[in-house]
């Protein structure tokens, strides 16, 4: 038997959220709304259930892996979640874009 419509919808929303976290600098709140959730706390709980990470932790881990050229499965011994280098990328799209353009990274 297949999955329920509700579970299918939740899976689709989580997949879209993951894709947006990996490819955009949108705020978590904006991603929450874009994925069909009205409450950021509820979205965060559902995301953590699905991926064992909060949306911010997921974005940080993905960005760290990308910047270090590591595969998603490899883990750095020290967590990069609190890295000073990554903080500008977690501040929201406008500030992250300003940081990137000021460093000629685009």
Image (cartoon, grey):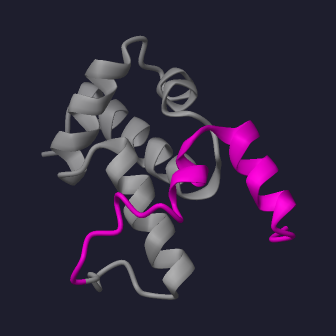
Seen as rendered, the residue at the extreme front is 84
Depth order, front residue of 27/50: 27
Q: Quadrant of the C terminus?
A: bottom right
Residue 60 appears left or right of 88: left
Location of residue 12 (image quadrant):
top left
Seen as rendered, the residue at the extreme left is 1
When the figure is inspected, residue 104 is found, relative to residue 33, above or below; the finding is: below
Report x, y in % for residue 103: 81, 67
Report x, y in % for residue 33: 52, 20
Q: Residue at x 47, y 61 (%)?
A: 84
When the figure is inspected, residue 71 is found, relative to residue 26, above or below; the finding is: below
When the figure is inspected, residue 63 is found, relative to residue 8, above or below; the finding is: below
Seen as rendered, the residue at the extreme top is 38
Q: How many marks?
A: 0
Residue 14 appears left or right of 45: right
Q: Is residue 100 magenta?
A: yes
Q: Is residue 39 magenta?
A: no
Q: Residue at x 77, y 49 (%)?
A: 97
Q: Which residues are magenta?
A: 77-106
| Residue 53 visible in image | yes
Report x, y in % for residue 77: 21, 83
Report x, y in % for residue 41: 29, 20
Location of residue 73 (image quadrant):
bottom left
Location of residue 104 (image quadrant):
bottom right
When the figure is inspected, residue 16 is found, relative to residue 29, above or below; the finding is: below
Q: Residue at x 31, y 33 (%)?
A: 10
Q: Residue at x 29, y 31 (%)?
A: 44
| Residue 7 visible in image | no
């Amino acid at each position: 038997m297949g999955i329920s419509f509700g579970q299918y919808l939740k899976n689709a929303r989580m997949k879209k959220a993951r894709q947006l976290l990996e490819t955009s600098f949108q705020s978590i709140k904006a991603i929450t709304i874009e994925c069909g959730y009205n409450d950021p706390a509820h979205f965060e709980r559902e995301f953590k259930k699905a991926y064992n990470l909060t949306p911010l932790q997921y974005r940080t881990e993905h960005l760290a892996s990308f910047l270090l050229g590591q595969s998603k499965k490899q883990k750095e011994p020290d967590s990069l979640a609190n890295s000073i280098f990554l903080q500008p990328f977690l501040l929201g799209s406008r500030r992250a874009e300003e940081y990137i353009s000021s460093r000629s990274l685009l």
